[in-house]
Image (spheres, rainbow, N blue to C red):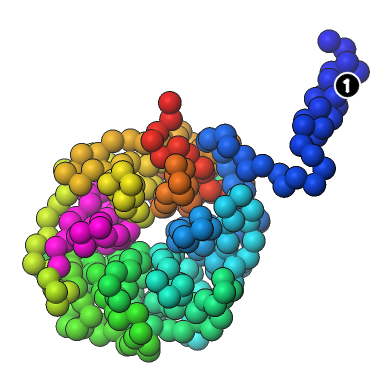
Amino acid sequence: MTRITLQLAVMFGFLGLSATHAADAPAPRPATVPRAIVLPDNCNTPDAMAVLPDGTLILSVPNFTDPTSPGVLMKIAPDDRVSLFCKLPPHPQTGGVFPMGVRQAPSGDLYVADCQILDTTPDNSRLLCVRVTDGRSGQVEVVADGLNVANGVAIRDGYVYVTDSETGKTADGAVASSVYRFRLSDRGVQVQKGGGDPHLVATLKTVSKEIPVGADGIDFDEHGNLYVANCGDAVIEKLVLNQAGRVVQQTALTASGQMKSADGIFYDRSTQQIFVADVLANAIRAVTLDGRVKTVAQSGDNDGSAGQLDGPSEAVVRGQELIAANFDRVFPGSVNTQSEKPYTLAVLNKAGQP
Ligand SMILES: [Ca+2]
Ligand SMILES: [Ca+2]
């Protein structure tokens, strides 16, 4: 085929495709998986997502790779269109804001962890509440301040739960981390260090020296059991709470060695599985409620441009699709070796690839 013929074929192919869709019909939603949702250049580090009832996603973007772009919340429409949802107020002491875990309360308000891990002084992380009216963001209020590494967020029965991935050391020198809970109506709580804060629900221990990150992703099943990802030790812990919110049982749901890391998690009621972002292995795992682990998707080292995983930090379910945020950061032992454009989400089949 000559060059001219090839150009004509490409042109006619394009024209043919255009003619298939009526002039004013909306563009159909791309159905192919895997595919990438490409984020604008000022969203260099996407982290976590809230799934709204209509299938809209609110995506947190802390921008750790290039903090000159302020942290924001973005909106991903059901047809994959990307737009700004809202900016967030910087922390008065650090001058920055780094949104990570995000979930929506029944009121519509969004609760967001502000992870101040780049700051050299500890305990400046916050839990924020973005008031939402008619789908639009309003005032942003501080629920709690004084967390160290605020990370994952979960909401149930009038309370918001947040993980703090490093709250000190255990007696034997391992990393201690915590789960706190606050009333959805709490504002301006100053968290007390040292394990004595009345909002403290649970403490986790992480022995990994390479990844000294403890409690990370967090979610509930429909029975009220709480699941927390122990990131560095690469296991999911199951916590049973009593009516007073105290832990009465804390066990490892998964055996060690099944994953390389356990970052953000999302419980899918329709399949009764916990989707786990294994950021180091560049994989998404599915964990059944009896603790079996299977791999839903895994990619080699890549840039994320074609719907591959690129250092995923969380994956959520939208219908039959699994949407992974490609955090795209490099860690000791991670498959991902470079943070690079494009900055993306990966859209996958939640049942795994055929
Ligand atoms: Ca990469
Ligand atoms: Ca990338």
Q: Provide residue 334's location: percent of width, then percent of height.
A: 39, 43
- Secondary structure under tag 1 reads helix
Say which residue label 1 marks: 8
Which secondary structure is most common in the magenta stretch? Answer: strand
Residue 274 left/right relative to 78: left
Q: Provide residue 221's location: percent of width, then percent of height.
A: 25, 56
> What residue occupies the far top of the structure in this picture?
1
Verify whether residue 164 appears in magenta: no
Q: Judge whether 333 appears above or below 130 on screen.
A: above
Query: What residue do we see at 29% from left, 69% from top?
Result: 156
Query: Is residue 149 visible to us here?
Result: no
Query: What residue do we see at 59% from left, 56% from top?
Result: 77
Give the magenta-colored segment's residue range.
214-241
Split into 4 quadrants, where in the image is the N terminus?
Answer: top right
Task: Choose top left, top right, bottom left or bottom right for residue 350.
Answer: top left
The amino acid at mark 1 is Leu
Q: Provide residue 198's location: percent of width, then percent of height.
A: 19, 84
Query: What residue do we see at 56% from left, 81% from top?
Result: 138
Query: What residue do we see at 31% from left, 51% from top?
Result: 269
Q: Judge whether 149 appears above or below 289 on screen.
A: below
Q: Provide residue 54's location: percent of width, then percent of height.
A: 51, 58
Q: How many marks?
A: 1
- Number of other residues with Cα within 10 Å of mark 1, as a class: few under 14, some 14 to 19, many 20 or more: few
Residue 333 left/right relative to 32: left
Query: Is residue 253 visible to us here?
Result: yes
Split into 4 quadrants, where in the image is the C terminus?
Answer: top left
Residue 348 left/right relative to 27: left
Residue 235 left/right relative to 103: left
Verify whether residue 230 appears in magenta: yes
